[in-house]
Amino acid sequence: MKLKLGLFLIGLFAAFFTIAFAPTHAEAGPVKLSYANFPPAPTFPCVQMERWKKEVEKRTNGKIAIDTYPGSTLLGAKNMMDGVIEGQADIGCLCMAYQPGRFVITNATSLPLGLPNAKVGSLVLWDIYKKYNPKTFAKVKVLTMFTTAPANIMCKKPVRNLQDIKGLDLRASGGAAQILKKWGANQVGMPMSETPEALQKGVVKGLFSSLEVLKDFKFAELCRYATMTDTAVYPFAVIMNMDKWNSLPKDVQKVMDDMAVEQAKWTGTYMDNHVNEANEWSKKTYNVEFIQLAKEEKAKWDELLEPITSEWIKGAKEKGFPAEAIVEDIKAFAKKRAASSD
Ligand code: 3IO
């Protein structure tokens, strides 16, 4: 009788402990998300990625843990969108200029419409995304968007006038590429992640992008001249796999949704400040010359860009986009965002 009771008590204890310490969902640890990026870790798309990761982990009180993959280790520049749609990464950061035909509406922000800096550019891009909700994003959740600062020419030789740029092999993508062509350069298209090798091998003599890359990719070592044109910005998007998004708890989704505009603004502000730092560093470290085009010369460069927007409108209209309205909205949003103090 005593033995039976003993066995019963042991059984009861065992049952109690099994139930009490069984791994419940909360104890299984945080939900893990992978976040893919194409350029190397020190560059601005990855700096904003680490900032977003840190803030999301903090604001969800550890419910989410994000593993970041910079440098095309999980997905590259051109398969980012499809890779995230297929679930090879949960989150991905992509430059929309690398697929101009796929992101027609949002890429209109890279027309030469005078977006003054990355902060305004990023907020205007987000405004355009929210207003037009482009169909091309139907299969993903868009977490944020941002742009670079306006593009300038970085080159191994000085570019002071249209004669200097004629036939020059310069690298750019998307809207920025159209601008280079109008100035008579021999435009070569490739993502930023392939540019260091192309510069090193001499496939291109320079590039057309925002100037912080002088420091972040050490392009200043090879490109000792920068010509200030302050034209197109490059637009970026951060997207999440739709099934993954739908599987997240509502409060986590809210944290991420609430961060969208804040992250756009943070990234634009970081970019604008970082361009200034990189320029100072380039002057000091490699004696890079920053060339200002003479006033009459600049007028000629600007004149060559005039047909770009009307040509874009014509092409986008043919594809069924409300092209004129998009351009007018970019200008109006830019005015509003530039005038706003926040
Ligand atoms: C860019 C892309 C990756 C890392 C740093 C960068 N700075 C500016 C860009 C813009 C861009 O995508 C490009 O191809 O010039």
Image (tube, rainbow, N blue to C red):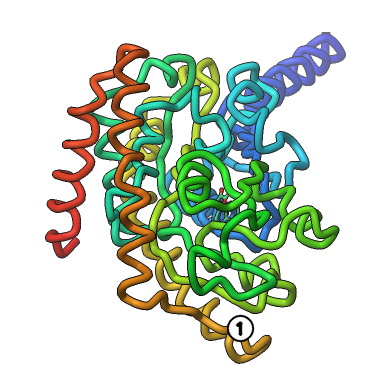
Residue 89: % across, % down: 66, 29
Work out whether 334 lies above or below 228.
Answer: above
SS type, badge 1: loop
Q: How many marks?
A: 1
Please tell me which residue lies in front, 7 or 1: 7
Residue 136 sits in quarter: top left
In the visual, does 38 lie left or right of 209?
A: right
Q: Residue at the location (55% across, 22% down)?
A: 241
At a point 43% along the width and 65% down the height, the residue shown is 270
Q: Residue at x 46, y 59 (%)?
A: 151
Give residue 267's quadrant in the image.
Answer: bottom left
Q: Is residue 325 above or below residue 153?
A: above
Residue 56 visible to the viewer: no
Q: Which residue is mark 1?
A: 288
Is any atom of residue 117 visible in this view? Answer: yes
Q: Quadrant of the C terminus?
A: bottom left
| Relative horizontal placement of residue 9, taking residue 250 as reference (left or right) | right
Of residues 260 and 134, which is closer to you in this image? 134
Front position in the image: 37 or 328: 328
Residue 234, horizontal then vertical, whole percent: 46, 47
